[in-house]
Image: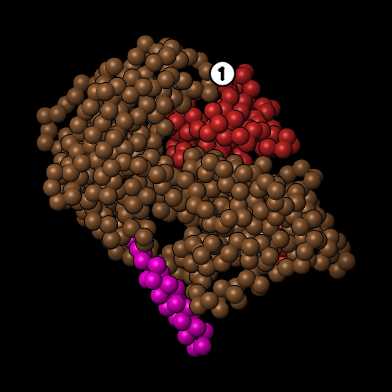
């Protein structure tokens, strides 16, 4: 038992000492795994009752020490105030906090859809790095596109985002009407 | 003991406090469990299923699909080299594990079961069956050999059982594709992409062999309108134009003064189009390297109207006759187009028409106008128990995100009517309808049968170094499903 705990500790210290770029790569590589793991275990439906999702393994607290608080406003204008790990993407934050928005992140963060679309306020938007071509292509097709829209799977949390609010788009009318 | 029970109740209450507004906190007050039927198992169908199951504690969702296997266009429309889009099936498969979800494959609504029969067995029916018919292509010569619709051609390489016997001849040098939408670009890309890049995908092995022997070096995309009316996206165009072995050609005169002005606009709603045309302009100006034998060519022939398909001998396609068109007006987003009397011949060896799809009429009870089902927020006009979602309601446009968003709207409409519908009528869903289907001698595939076929395809693919090797005949699908059932029966007997 003790040796398992020590093994665990050495993994944690090893991971903590990784540079943030390597951490990013690790997170990216395991995102699909973590997303699928979450989806497989949530929600359990028994006798027509939704029970809590059970997550027995979480990479997030092992890899990150820095957390901030952000607000995510869902499609029904309800605000969820959640903890977010610095360097995680918005999609990671939604998954790790088990927010379970419907049809959010359908392609599992592979920039093949635009369902993880979020809207920033101008101040925060202006501090973000320019979106890459792939993201621009998918954003073009997003419903309710605005000047401060980004894909949630492509924007990483920074310390400076403490207390920020991001919104899921309200409009369901689609790009085909444009 | 009591505290445990209380804890459980409060936990369940807090968890069943749904993420939507309070008006979605549904549970049936009466005794009847609501039964909802979804026709179609693509993104729209599964999107609606997810919304219903998540927001109603008792609803039973039954999904009917025409062919034995699910997922609709994700399986048969999305191209083999777009596996990332197919990730969506992971979420749908998770939905299918719900105890309140059942899948009934190999049941053709309209043919095997009528819509009125469904409506009497279910409290609500949601039509999500897509747009299965081709837009009519009225052109002489459309029945010549080696002339295909996109439904046929895409179905052929994607393993759709209906199109496996297509005689696709790629021994010629040029292909003409009518249309400039994403489907047209998919077809162009399949013809131009080095086949090594397709080897590990779920393209059928027989289509891959045909492509490996292909002599096609030039692909022409024919569009009737101007650059700002191209229906494809920048991403799709770049996937072909960006291939190392492909040079892209566009006529300079396409980029008229009005187009240049339009490119400078700041309107967010036009951003998609501006980015597309700016990219097209960029690639057309690139210096062409055609020294290599492997170089292939992509030509965009805009402002051309196809008027006849002609052959030289043996009824084999040899030429597309085109009429040149002119674009007028200052606004390149809303110009007028006029035909000139200048004829142009486009010699080619294969034609694929990618001019769009439209709805099939599966029942006279559905109000169709201009190929769209009349509905408000997904609820079919003049009907209280019939709903619709996705391509079959809006017409055949839109990508995965559009169907997903649509399903939220339709799902909300169903939910807001469901409890009333459940208390108005007693019916038992699949318990009412399945015996009727079985009496007609039909075999239904369950979700478990799909998982058997799925495992079979993946195993077979693994042996060939592919993601999967699709089963391309419905009979074989049913046979594999039956073998799976009897293996399981034998194992449990032991």
Image location (x, y in percent) of residue B168: 23, 52
**Residue B304, image x and y in percent?**
30, 28
Q: Secondary structure at mark 1?
A: helix
Q: Quadrant of the C terminus of chain A?
A: top right
Tell which chain the image draws in red: A
Residue B248 shown left or right of residue A56 in the figure = left
Residue A64, picture quadrant = top right
Looking at the picture, tell me which residue is in the foreground, B148 or B417: B148
Quarter that holds the N terminus of chain A: bottom right
Color scheme of the displayed model: by chain
| Main SS category, magenta section | helix
Judge whether A12 appears above or below B272 on screen. below
Residue found at x 19% / y 24%: B288
Camera-side residue: B22 or B374? B374
Task: Tell me the magenta residue range.
Answer: B469-494
Q: Which residue is mark 1?
A: A126
Q: Is residue B244 left or right of residue B429?
A: left
Rendered view: B444 above or below B170: below
Q: Position of residue B313 (x, y in %)?
A: 13, 47
Colour for chain B in the figure: brown
Q: State which quadrant residue B251 falls in.
A: top left
Q: Residue at x 54, y 48 (%)?
A: B392
Residue B31 is a magenta residue? no
B106 and B158: which is toward the camera: B106
Mark 1 — on which chain does it sit?
Answer: A
Note whether residue A33 is visible.
Answer: no
Would residue B324 be visible to someone looking at this image? yes
């Amino acid at each position: 038992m003790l040796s398992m705990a020590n093994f665990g500790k050495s993994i944690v210290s090893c991971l903590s000492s990784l540079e943030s770029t390597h951490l990013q790569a690790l997170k990216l590589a395991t995102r699909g795994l973590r997303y699928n793991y979450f989806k497989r275990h949530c929600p359990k439906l028994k006798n027509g009752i939704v029970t809590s999702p059970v997550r027995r393994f979480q990479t997030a607290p092992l890899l990150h020490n820095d957390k901030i608080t952000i607000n995510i406003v869902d499609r029904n204008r309800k605000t969820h105030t959640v903890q977010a790990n610095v360097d995680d993407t918005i999609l990671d934050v939604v998954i790790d906090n088990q927010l379970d928005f419907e049809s959010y992140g359908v392609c599992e963060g592979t920039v093949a859809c635009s369902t993880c679309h979020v809207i920033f306020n101008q101040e925060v938007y202006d501090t973000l790095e320019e979106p890459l071509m792939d993201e621009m292509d998918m954003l073009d097709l997003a419903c309710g596109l605005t000047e401060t829209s980004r894909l949630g799977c492509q924007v990483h949390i920074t310390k400076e985002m403490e207390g920020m609010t991001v919104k899921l788009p309200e409009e369901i009318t689609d790009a085909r009407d444009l | 003991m009591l505290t445990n029970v209380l804890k459980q109740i409060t936990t369940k209450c807090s968890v069943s406090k749904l993420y939507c507004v309070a008006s979605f906190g549904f549970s049936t007050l009466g005794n009847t469990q609501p039964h909802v039927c979804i026709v179609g198992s693509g993104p729209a169908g599964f999107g609606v299923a997810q919304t219903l199951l998540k927001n109603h504690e008792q609803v039973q969702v039954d999904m009917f699909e025409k062919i034995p296997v699910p997922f609709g266009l994700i399986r048969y429309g999305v191209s083999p080299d777009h596996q990332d889009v197919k990730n969506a099936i992971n979420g749908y498969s998770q939905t299918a594990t719900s105890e309140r979800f059942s899948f009934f494959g190999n049941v053709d609504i309209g043919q095997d079961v009528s819509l009125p029969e469904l409506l009497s067995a279910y409290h609500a029916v949601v039509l999500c069956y897509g747009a299965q018919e081709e837009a009519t292509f009225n052109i002489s010569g459309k029945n010549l050999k080696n002339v295909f619709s996109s439904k046929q051609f895409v179905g052929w390489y994607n393993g759709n059982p209906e199109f496996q016997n297509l005689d696709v001849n790629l021994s010629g040098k040029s292909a003409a594709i009518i249309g400039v939408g994403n489907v047209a670009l998919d077809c162009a890309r399949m013809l131009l992409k080095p086949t090594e890049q397709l080897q590990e995908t779920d393209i059928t092995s027989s289509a891959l062999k045909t492509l490996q022997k292909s002599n096609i070096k030039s692909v022409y995309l024919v569009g009737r309108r101007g650059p700002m009316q191209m229906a494809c996206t920048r991403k799709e165009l770049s996937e072909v134009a960006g291939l190392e072995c492909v040079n892209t050609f566009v006529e300079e005169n396409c980029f008229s003064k009005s187009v240049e002005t339009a490119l400078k606009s700041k309107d967010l709603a036009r951003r998609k189009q501006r980015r597309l045309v700016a990219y097209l302009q960029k690639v057309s100006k690139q210096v062409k390297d055609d020294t290599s034998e492997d170089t292939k060519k992509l030509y965009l022939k805009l402002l051309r109207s196809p008027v006849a398909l002609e052959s030289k001998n043996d009824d084999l396609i040899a030429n597309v006759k085109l009429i040149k068109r002119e674009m007028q007006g200052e606004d390149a987003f809303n110009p007028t187009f006029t035909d000139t009397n200048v004829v142009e011949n486009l010699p080619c060896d294969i034609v694929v028409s990618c001019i769009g799809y439209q709805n099939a009429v599966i029942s006279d009870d559905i109000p169709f106008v201009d190929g769209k089902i009349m509905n408000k927020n997904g609820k079919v006009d003049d009907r209280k128990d019939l709903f619709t979602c996705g391509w079959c309601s809006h017409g055949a446009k839109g990508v995965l995100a559009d169907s997903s968003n649509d399903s939220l709207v339709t799902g909300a409409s169903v939910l807001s009517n469901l409890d009333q519908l459940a208390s108005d009528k007693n019916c038992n869903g699949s318990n009412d309808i399945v015996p009727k289907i079985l009496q007609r001698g039909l075999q239904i595939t369950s979700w478990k049968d799909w998982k058997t076929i799925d495992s079979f395809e993946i195993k077979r693919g693994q042996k060939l170094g592919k993601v999967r090797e699709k089963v391309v005949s419905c009979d074989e699908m049913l046979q594999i499903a039956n073998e799976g059932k009897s293996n399981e029966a034998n194992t449990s007997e032991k």
